[in-house]
Amino acid sequence: MRIYTFDTTLRDGTQGEAISFTVDDKLVIAQKLDELGIDYLEGGWPGSNRRDKEFFARARDLSLKHARLTAFGSTRFARNPVDRDPNVRALVEAGTPVIAVFGKTWDLHTSRALGISEEENLKLISETVRFLKDHGKEVIFDAEHFFDGYFSNQSFALRALEAARDAGADLLCLCDTNGGALTSKLAEAVAEVRRRFDLPLGIHAHNDSDLAVANTLAAVEQGVTHVQGTINGYGERCGNANLCSIIPNLELKMGHTTIGPEKLLGLASVARFVAELANLPLRSDQPYVGRSAFAHKGGVHVSAVLKEAATYEHVPPAVVGNRQRVLLSDLSGRGNILYKLKQHGIADRLSEDARRELLERIKHLEFSGYELEAAEGTFELLVREALRPGVHFFEVVGFEVSTKVDGNAPPRSVASVTLETPHGVHSATAQGHGPVHALDLCLRRCLSPLYPSITEVRLTDYKVRVLDSKMGSAAKVRVLIEWSDHRKSWATVGVSDNVVEASWLAMVDALRLELMRLTEQDQSVEKAVEDYCWGV
Amino acid sequence: MRIYTFDTTLRDGTQGEAISFTVDDKLVIAQKLDELGIDYLEGGWPGSNRRDKEFFARARDLSLKHARLTAFGSTRFARNPVDRDPNVRALVEAGTPVIAVFGKTWDLHTSRALGISEEENLKLISETVRFLKDHGKEVIFDAEHFFDGYFSNQSFALRALEAARDAGADLLCLCDTNGGALTSKLAEAVAEVRRRFDLPLGIHAHNDSDLAVANTLAAVEQGVTHVQGTINGYGERCGNANLCSIIPNLELKMGHTTIGPEKLLGLASVARFVAELANLPLRSDQPYVGRSAFAHKGGVHVSAVLKEAATYEHVPPAVVGNRQRVLLSDLSGRGNILYKLKQHGIADRLSEDARRELLERIKHLEFSGYELEAAEGTFELLVREALRPGVHFFEVVGFEVSTKVDGNAPPRSVASVTLETPHGVHSATAQGHGPVHALDLCLRRCLSPLYPSITEVRLTDYKVRVLDSKMGSAAKVRVLIEWSDHRKSWATVGVSDNVVEASWLAMVDALRLELMRLTEQDQSVEKAVEDYCWGV
């Protein structure tokens, strides 16, 4: 059966404690989720804050191929006529084809939180739904706290659904807002609603009892055809139902159609992308999409899985864009690297000396605090330098960067850089938004006359972490920079007790690597690196 | 009904990719889980590695009050007579009152992984179980891959259970080893086993489909009385069923007895303790025990939860040793902030105007990319500035910092800072390990003659994140700095497209805050802030 996916990462997801998306983040995520084949994208609550209002204004320029953009908001306030309720007006003004409007279905809420009668509550629901329908919207009625309401006062909860239906709602979405419902009881409640209501039903589950995915699947078994959730289960408190688990369960195990098998191949990549923008590590043990989801450590498991993957894998990892990993717990650090180099035939291309020197360099870097697993660019450069001894493209003669603030004027950062190349000495000076920007501009000015294509390399992320916090502001820092040249992306790392120098080292590595790649294709190196560092 | 808890954190939990416990860690955890009231503690696989063997040797000195220590291992190898199988002998020698022995119940495994006939497999099971019973052990038969086996070849799977029962096993534990089973199908299989077998049943679920907790509860609904899992769901691949979710669900929602309501009060503390020893952050969104599990961010939620906690909390957080938290952000409306300020009697001390201005400042900062939730120092400063309008201690006249590298010489960072204080203009110049260090030294040199105790404030962590990665090296960055004065620690935040300025803003906030604190004790402010940034 066709089950419709409704993503609320951009609305309920942002209620997660650690989640904070800029409007730009939200627009990029919307685009990505559209590509994944999500049916509905809930973008925010335009009546509640500026950021969401701005999102909808700018979302008009998005060209979504498939997803229907949805604005979220509450039924009108008790004291406002519906056409003069600012929140309802903001919903209409958001300009989306779909509106998800939530109303109360739990008597505790109307009596305690709102302090209104049931009669009034039913009026809020029906007038708001009707008003939105009159404006030509597809209206999803989110029955907030439906299950708590149903178990507390069944007829009250059902009358609220009737009010929405009678006012013309297109779909009734049953919400376990507090995430407290047990699967078997929730399934009974859904079955009863299914018996009484003839329009499409949805489910919106939270994970407070660690049951959000199970509850969503149980609702589908009872006839629900619309599932709400978020990427990586982000959301308030313990999060929302995780679409990254729900979608493959529906597709691969229950015979339903959601985004389809082809788009499913992109699932792990979307999970990582959203985590990246949320600035959170993707949980490595996350079902289906985590880095450890198909990683085998125990000896018994490893030997069996190498004979027959199905012995310890519930689905083939590739169908969700993930992959099998066999952890080499006896081969760690350098051993592991050597193993990978051998596996890709690179070790044989190195002389005994070059191999030893490479391992020494790696050992030294790891000891200084480099994490090569997270910086495939720096690792790739090391391997390529071992394969092409003496090729550096440029040496750093010196650099200087200063940042100055006078009173309330914006800060000025100015840098100058001198490099020596086989074609002579090149210097450049530039002013930038900050010291990293200024140095980056200088580097490119020195190098682009010789190597024009390095202008395509772009910094996409920049992270700094203190390594030895006992040293206070004199501590050693690790700078991790991510780069992209539109073809692929990679990270480089620099470590120093000077944050500017650490950034500089990572920048120099990135540009040297790009020059290495431009002057010599070496796919076995790229594969060995990908294999070793996958998942960063 | 009494449901028995079986913890395998020390065995299956250690198969998690990131998990590595020393023997000492394992002993301390065993003690802690005994105090929590866990019924069975699976300590390891004595036949598989030295560490686990050592654990059992040293565990004899533990004085467990309640838990029964359990050793884990496989049925005998096909080529060994049972009394000369090293693995089975190691099980007996572990000296535990209970043995969990696993055997194959999936025909794929006997044919592909072991390469033996069904007849032989049944002999492995019955001989091993009987041998262990003859040694006076309580024997739990772990039916490995039971559900995959049952769905693939039902009679094969059931005959394996019969062999274990007939050999005297005390309990049959049905394992979803690959974590691939759907809840409704698993429940049907359990029901069928329940109909056919008269001895106690157990369930051992993995989380590969994000259903481990639901599957465990579904099995209990079908008559299972023994639940296996791990603290925080640690375990191979996507982890095991999480006892921190299962126990409160059984106790609080299903009317069963496990560790009892009194021990349940220690659940969140045990979860943190085990995470601490695993050297992993406790997932903040973890159900029941996570730091965010009862944290409210959305404005509607906050205002309702303040009237009646049950409106957005599925259980009272205190029953599992957790607590309610109200967060600040631009999604909050006024409820969150007013809550914090009112709770500590601060709101009454602000004029209507000051209150509105504070709210506006917070909204503006959040919109610019500040994350006040993570920066309690900056938040505390905002509140204190609202309470003491015009008190700044110093104004920044200007600063400059430059970093220079010549050839292979180490980098030099030099800064100069000019501040205006009520006691005149102060300038300082300093050289540091990096620009942040140099600026920090200058700030202290300017201020310490006036306020000697600020020398006690020390930077303990420094993090930088890019906010809008599309801007490349010109992107806006957020700098988060953690500080400590040996009495307490706090964080401040700065946002700018210049990383030096962002760092500077966070440094200035930290020192201004310290000066505020030194010149005016205001415990109600500190408490309001502490409350909201409850640290784990």
Image (tube, coloured by chain):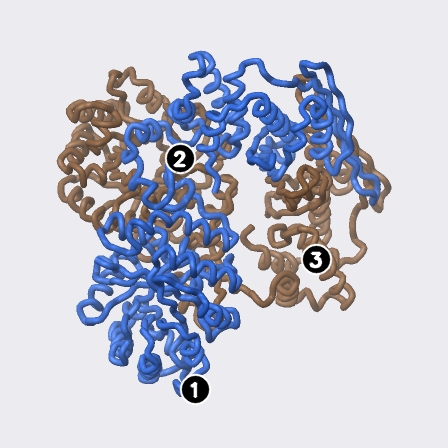
Chain colours: A brown, B blue
The chain identifier of the residue carrying mark 1 reads B
Horizontal arrangement in the rendering, residue A148 relative to residue B125 (left or right): left
**Alpha carbon separation for disc pair 3 and 1:** 47 Å
Residue placed under numbered mark 3 in the picture: A362
Q: Residue at x 50, y 55 (%)?
A: B278
The chain identifier of the residue carrying mark 2 reads B
Q: Which mark is residue B325?
A: 2
Dots 2 and 1 on the same chain:
yes
Residue B163 on image: x %, y %: 27, 79
Q: Residue at x 42, y 45 (%)?
A: A232
Dots 3 and 1 on the same chain:
no
Pointers 3 and 2 in contact (CB under 8 A)? Answer: no
**Alpha carbon separation for disc pair 2 and 1:** 58 Å
The amino acid type of the residue labelled 1 equals Arg
**Which secondary structure lies at badge 2?**
strand
The chain identifier of the residue carrying mark 3 reads A
Q: Residue at x 69, y 35 (%)?
A: A436
**Residue B453's quadrant in the figure?**
top right
Q: Nearer the viewer, mark 3 or mark 1?
A: 1
Residue placed under numbered mark 1 in the picture: B84
**Which secondary structure lies at badge 3?**
helix
Vertical position of residue A280 compared to residue A391: above or below? above
Residue A445 on image: x %, y %: 75, 35
**Residue B153's quadrant in the figure?**
bottom left
Circle 2 crowding by C-alpha within 10 Å: few under 14, some 14–19, many from 20: many
